[in-house]
Image (cartoon, rainbow, N blue to C red):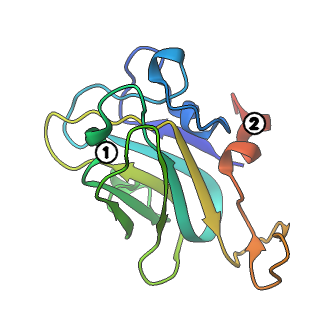
Amino acid sequence: LGKAFQSSTLANGSASKAIDGRRDSTYYEGFCTHTLEETNPWWRLDLRETHAVTSVKVTNRGDCCAQRLDGAEIRIGNSAENNGNDNPKCASISHIGAGKTVTFYCEGGSVMGRFVNVIIPGPKKALTLCEVEVYAGTTVTDFGHFGSNPKFWLSVVSISSLTKTSRGN
């Protein structure tokens, strides 16, 4: 189970919107996160235990401002220092089209970590995420088998499906 946090919140764009299990990309209908415009805005998922994260799927906002995610970084690690933003980089987001979902594979195969962050470096930036899905290979605690591939153990299919029962915790 995991819990989401972010650097700030604009209107109803709370951090948990990125792990609600819906890839709907319409912010104005209440489906996406949104920070204030600030320096280095970030979003963080606390997985509550260490996983070998192999990839992260990110769904971008579809009703406006798709370019805002350009240059964002996905960082994964066990340190909560600087809100997890100094953890090793899994991948960089060069661009995600409006309303599109893109899978980012961690450089080097996998990154071990409890915290999954998305941060946009630089001043006067706003971060909006409509869904974040974290995928991991063999971990400290495996949850079961994924599909027909015996070499891939499911630790986190979609954090959104694992967090539905933990809201408010």
Tell whether 26 sits left or right of 162.
left
Residue at the spot 37% in from the left edge and 45% down from the top edge? 97
Can you give x and y, in whole percent of width and height, for residue 29 in the image?
Answer: 53, 16
| Amino acid type shown at disc 1 | Leu
Q: Residues within 10 Å of mark 2 (few under 14, many from 20)?
A: some
Name which quarter of the figure residue 18 lies in: top right
Tell whether 82 sits left or right of 139.
left
**Frontmost residue, 103 versus 123:** 103
Tell me the tag on residue 87.
none
**Frontmost residue, 127 versus 84:** 127
| Amino acid type shown at disc 2 | Lys
Residue at the spot 59% in from the left edge and 52% down from the top edge? 133
Tell whether 136 sits left or right of 93.
right
**Frontmost residue, 8 versus 103:** 103
Most extreme residue toward the left is 123
On the image, numbered disc 2 is attached to which residue? 164
Q: Residues within 10 Å of mark 1 (few under 14, many from 20)?
A: many
From the image, which quarter does the C terminus lie in? Answer: top right
Distance between the alpha carbons at the discs numbered 1 and 2? 26 Å
Can you give x and y, in whole percent of width and height, for residue 143 in the image?
Answer: 83, 66
Residue at the spot 68% in from the left edge and 43% down from the top edge? 160
Residue at the spot 53% in from the left edge and 19% down from the top edge? 30
Can you give x and y, in whole percent of width and height, for residue 127 in the image?
Answer: 33, 36
On the image, numbered disc 1 is attached to which residue? 69
Name which quarter of the figure residue 38 lies in: top left
